[in-house]
Image (cartoon, coloured by chain):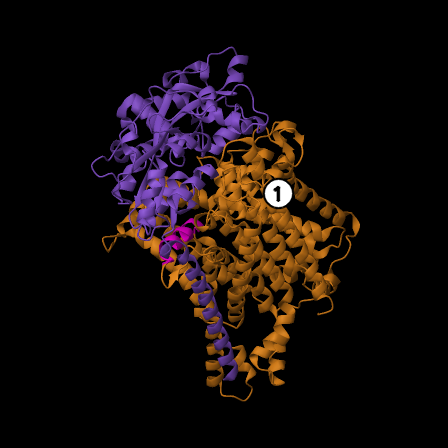
Chain colours: A orange, B purple
């Protein structure tokens, strides 16, 4: 108990009560939020599927899992997620190192660029990748290489999506690790590898685990990518839940699959919480700008070059193909498709598609605000050295990432339609759903940094008479401001790109960008296709610009604060 | 204890803030459709479209303001309507087709109303005549489309019937949609079941698979990526000259092209068609029943029926409505499409789709 220790002369009992009460206070809001906007809707839709005439049909669970089709889906879901995670770590960890330790021209722009894929709607990414590795794609034309309807296309697209998760989560911490610790180990005679393994790796452990966990969660619940690139022969749990709910209205099968996914994700989170706890150490954090330097020697330059090449081929190329298609109009290159976006004549919407840009920004801002409040409070509560209850809460916060967005969307539909929570026809519904996926990002980004803050500083503040709140404001906040901004950026970005739940609850007269793109792609004709590409490009640019602004903000504010 | 209190107070205040925000949002929202009976809401799928002036004319004449909620693809829209039927999102639902009709009726989605002008609807489309829970609005045919240029270049006659599709001459040419996720995919499956019977269709699909049929998930992908005859497909270098689409797809290729070609680049194999009929109905707990009834009357009025073909690319069901020139010129008339009673579809759909999935996809 941190707070107990701060009360030097107070009886331990009193300190304990006070610390627990403060934590419960901090936890109250996130708990209420998740109870109302997550647990209740999901439980309601599951109950609708498994309860017949008031009787729970638990027999259905064994029945559904017993089907060979379902087991096949489960197996594919698991192994492709494992393979995607391994591949992403393999490709992105060198990138994380390069971004953390090297100073080079265009670093900020590039860091923003690699994050853009992460926020693109899956339909767009699928189409962009198809244009790259599919039939008649760039690789096909050049080398006759086609990967569509193979599992390779799925894996590569997953790397494309999640590269930024590793670079940001691991690289963010890496850039603040004091290299002098490793240098000290080497001075004492450790080899370069041993120094890295015994000093840097344990420090990075929690961040790598967190990143791997996120990648695993995203790929385990992958939907659009698998559907477009894998073809109908490949199906993940998430795809199957969507099919059973939206297409077949077989709610009992969907409910069982939701529970299976829920349990699987719960297990993974439990293991993760355990590993993180074992590796947790107090880290010596330094200002990133004092650590990064220009690469020296052939090895370092080669590493930088290799990372650049990977980024160019895997991330910039698919994005480039997207832009090319948006500009390639019926009469050669031009802005025809962009001009069409301002007219409501196409018939896909009641409003010009360009309005979706403004809608999306408003929704995403509201969702970011909600996610920061909820996630920030939760992270603050979790920072305190925790008992079992709080650790359970930690894992609970991650669940929205692992639970089918389709289930959440349908759950919203059937639960939030009665007073006092008659939200179904209001604008707040969309940001609420988007905030659900934003909160875990805020917590994940804030937590490693918050936990790494040396408790003794807080104690010192307390000894000098500061209240816990004041100690937090004066000690923790300045050190986590950077993380807070990154968290905000992530929350904003995922809100902007959220599709699975939004598509069910966004009102057609207020479509978001991803919803608008999907609707346009679903209609025949070159104009609609071109408009979808143009709108995707706009979404991409909006994301890139906001992320770039964030990078700037970050460096300006944090200079000299460490 | 003051700090603990502070934290708790802050927490409670934020919770209340969020609830208050939601609450004021909700009072704004529900005012739109509940209390004000001058508003009527149509719930439909993404493909719903109507000319602005036709809708305005109705609003002027009836005094109602129409809101349209386009709620996903056809299957998802119906299922959403069923899930939310206790407190529906609107007053009228349009877009439940014959493949899903029984599901909607069995779940009591609609209430009875015989729309004005129902007697003008061609008798072949009328169902549920004793209760009048649904009103037919349009019909369309799901058919194999072909790339005219491909077959001209190869000096090969395009296929005409289901039987043709399994001939060696058309090996590896057809792309269709996943019957479990796409309505044209399902329609095509039902068409083969209607043609070859409950016991014969599986044998037909074995032959079709052996003849290299490709299955993709959705219509968009099949038509705009894989099919060599559509504008999107040409661009994506699609290499399949046969695709399961609609009889009305050729006029669409003409209408949305700039400049419009003299002749549609694609044609229709008229012996491969399955008829799809779309219905509308007054939702069970509609808040504005009166307005909903007026809206249903409007959907089968001559004005709306005339306006439909070029907006939704479907055929009117009202007799004596003239088709637009573009439709007559570039479209085809399907004389003897395959059909199936909604009851029979409801009884067999899930089982057939399941067998089809293991037969064709696995």
State the residue in front, B126 or B12.
B126
Relative to A207, A503 lies left or right: left
Q: Is residue A411 magenta?
A: yes
x, y percentage for residue B88?
Answer: 34, 50
What residue is shown at x 46% (from left), y 53% (from top)?
A: A402
* B240 is higher (above) or lower (below) than A207: above
| Image quadrant occupied by the C terminus of chain B | top left
Q: Secondary structure at mark 1?
A: helix
Residue at far front of view: B61
x, y percentage for residue A51?
Answer: 27, 53
What residue is shown at x 33% (from left), y 19% (from top)?
A: B336
Residue at far bottom of view: A9
Q: How many marks do you count on the picture?
A: 1
Quarter assignment of residue A464: bottom right
Disc 1 residue crowd, few under 14, some 14–19, many 20+, Cα 10 Å: many
What residue is shown at x 65% (from left), y 50% (from top)?
A: A544
Relative to A491, B67 lies left or right: left
Which residue is identified by label 1? Answer: A537
Instruction: Give the overall secondary structure of the magenta segment.
Output: helix
- Asked whether residue A248 appears in the rendered view, the answer is no
x, y percentage for residue B132?
Answer: 25, 38
State the residue in front, B58 or A361.
B58
The magenta region covers: A404-417
State the residue in front, B71 or A210.
B71
Q: Is residue A497 magenta?
A: no
What residue is shown at x 73% (from left), y 61% (from top)?
A: A289
């Amino acid at each position: 108990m941190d707070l107990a220790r701060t009360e030097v002369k107070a009886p331990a009992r009193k300190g304990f009560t006070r610390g627990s009460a403060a934590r419960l206070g901090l936890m109250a809001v996130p708990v209420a939020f998740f109870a109302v906007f997550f647990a209740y809707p999901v439980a309601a839709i599951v109950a609708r599927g498994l309860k017949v005439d008031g009787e729970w049909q638990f027999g259905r669970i064994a029945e559904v899992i017993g089907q060979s089709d379902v087991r096949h889906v489960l197996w594919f879901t698991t192994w492709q997620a494992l393979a995607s995670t391994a591949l992403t770590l393999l490709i992105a960890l060198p990138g994380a190192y390069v971004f953390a330790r090297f100073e080079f021209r265009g670093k900020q722009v590039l860091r923003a660029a690699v994050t853009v894929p992460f926020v693109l709607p899956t339909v767009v990414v699928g189409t962009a990748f198809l244009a790259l590795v599919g039939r008649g794609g760039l690789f096909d034309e050049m080398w006759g290489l086609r990967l569509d309807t193979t599992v390779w296309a799925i894996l590569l697209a997953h790397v494309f999506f999640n590269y930024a998760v590793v670079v940001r989560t691991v690289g963010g911490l890496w850039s603040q690790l004091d290299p002098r610790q490793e240098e000290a180990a080497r001075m004492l005679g450790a080899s370069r590898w041993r120094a890295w393994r015994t000093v840097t790796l344990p420090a990075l452990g929690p961040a790598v685990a967190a990143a791997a966990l996120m990648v695993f969660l995203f790929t385990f619940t992958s939907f659009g990518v698998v559907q477009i690139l894998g073809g109908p022969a490949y199906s993940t749990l998430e795809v199957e839940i969507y099919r059973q709910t939206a297409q077949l209205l077989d709610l009992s099968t969907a409910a069982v699959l939701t529970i299976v996914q829920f349990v699987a994700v719960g297990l993974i989170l439990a293991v993760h919480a355990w590993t993180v706890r074992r590796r947790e150490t107090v880290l010596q954090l330094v200002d990133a700008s004092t650590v990064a330097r220009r690469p020296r020697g052939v090895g370092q330059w080669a590493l930088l070059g290799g990372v650049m090449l990977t980024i160019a081929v895997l991330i910039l190329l698919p994005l480039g193909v997207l832009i090319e298609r948006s500009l390639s109009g019926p009469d050669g290159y031009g802005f025809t498709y962009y001009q069409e976006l301002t007219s409501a004549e196409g018939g896909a919407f009641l409003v010009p598609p360009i309005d979706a840009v403004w809608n999306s920004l408003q929704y995403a801002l509201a969702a970011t605000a909600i996610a920061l409040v909820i996630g920030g409070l939760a992270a603050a509560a979790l920072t305190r050295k925790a008992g079992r209850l709080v650790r359970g809460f930690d894992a609970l916060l991650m669940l929205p990432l692992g639970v089918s967005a389709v289930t959440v969307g349908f759950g919203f539909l059937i639960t939030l339609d009665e007073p006092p929570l008659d939200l179904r026809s209001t604008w707040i519904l969309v940001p609420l759903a988007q905030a659900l996926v934003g909160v875990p990002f805020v917590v994940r980004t804030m937590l490693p940094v918050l936990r790494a803050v040396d408790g003794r500083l807080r104690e010192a503040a307390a000894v000098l008479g500061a209240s816990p709140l004041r100690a937090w404001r004066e000690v923790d906040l300045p050190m986590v401001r950077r993380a807070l901004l990154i968290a905000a950026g992530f929350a904003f970005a995922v809100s902007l790109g959220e599709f699975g739940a939004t598509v069910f609850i966004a009102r057609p007269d207020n479509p978001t960008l991803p919803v608008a793109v999907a609707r346009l792609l679903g209609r025949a004709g070159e104009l609609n296709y071109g408009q979808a590409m143009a709108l995707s490009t706009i979404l991409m640019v909006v994301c890139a610009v906001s992320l770039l602004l964030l990078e700037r903000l970050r460096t300006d504010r944090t200079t000299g604060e460490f | 204890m003051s700090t603990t209190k502070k934290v708790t107070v802050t927490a409670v205040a934020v919770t209340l803030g969020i609830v208050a925000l939601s609450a004021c949002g909700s009072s704004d929202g529900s005012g739109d459709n509940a209390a004000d009976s001058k508003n009527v809401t149509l719930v439909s799928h993404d493909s719903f479209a109507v000319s602005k002036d036709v809708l305005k004319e109705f609003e002027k004449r009836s005094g109602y303001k129409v809101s349209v909620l386009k709620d996903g693809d056809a299957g998802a829209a119906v299922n959403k309507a069923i899930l939310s039927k206790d407190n529906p999102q609107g007053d009228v639902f349009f877009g439940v087709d014959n493949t899903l009709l029984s599901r909607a009726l069995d779940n009591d989605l609609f209430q009875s109303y015989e729309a004005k002008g129902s007697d003008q609807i061609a008798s072949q489309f009328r169902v549920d005549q004793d209760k009048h829970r649904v009103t037919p609005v349009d019909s369309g045919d799901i058919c194999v489309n072909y790339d005219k240029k491909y077959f001209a270049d190869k000096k090969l006659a395009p296929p005409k019937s289901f039987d043709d599709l399994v001939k060696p001459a058309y090996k590896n040419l057809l792309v269709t949609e996943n019957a479990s996720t796409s309505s044209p995919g399902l329609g095509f499956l039902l068409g083969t079941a209607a043609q070859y019977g409950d016991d014969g269709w599986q044998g037909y699909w074995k032959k079709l698979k052996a003849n290299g049929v490709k299955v993709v998930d959705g219509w968009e992908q099949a038509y705009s990526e894989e099919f060599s005859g559509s504008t999107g497909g040409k661009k994506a270098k699609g290499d399949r000259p046969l695709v399961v689409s609609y009889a009305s797809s050729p006029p669409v290729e003409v209408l949305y092209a700039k400049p419009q070609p003299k002749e549609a680049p694609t044609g229709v194999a008229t012996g491969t068609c399955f008829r799809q009929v779309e219905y509308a109905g007054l939702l069970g707990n509609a808040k504005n029943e009166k307005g909903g009834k007026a809206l249903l009357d409007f959907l089968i009025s001559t004005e709306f029926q005339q306006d439909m073909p070029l907006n939704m690319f479907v055929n009117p069901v009202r007799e004596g409505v003239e088709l637009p020139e573009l439709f007559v010129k570039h479209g085809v008339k399907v004389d003897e499409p395959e059909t199936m009673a909604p009851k029979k579809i409801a009884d067999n759909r899930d089982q057939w789709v399941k067998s089809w999935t293991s037969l064709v996809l696995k």
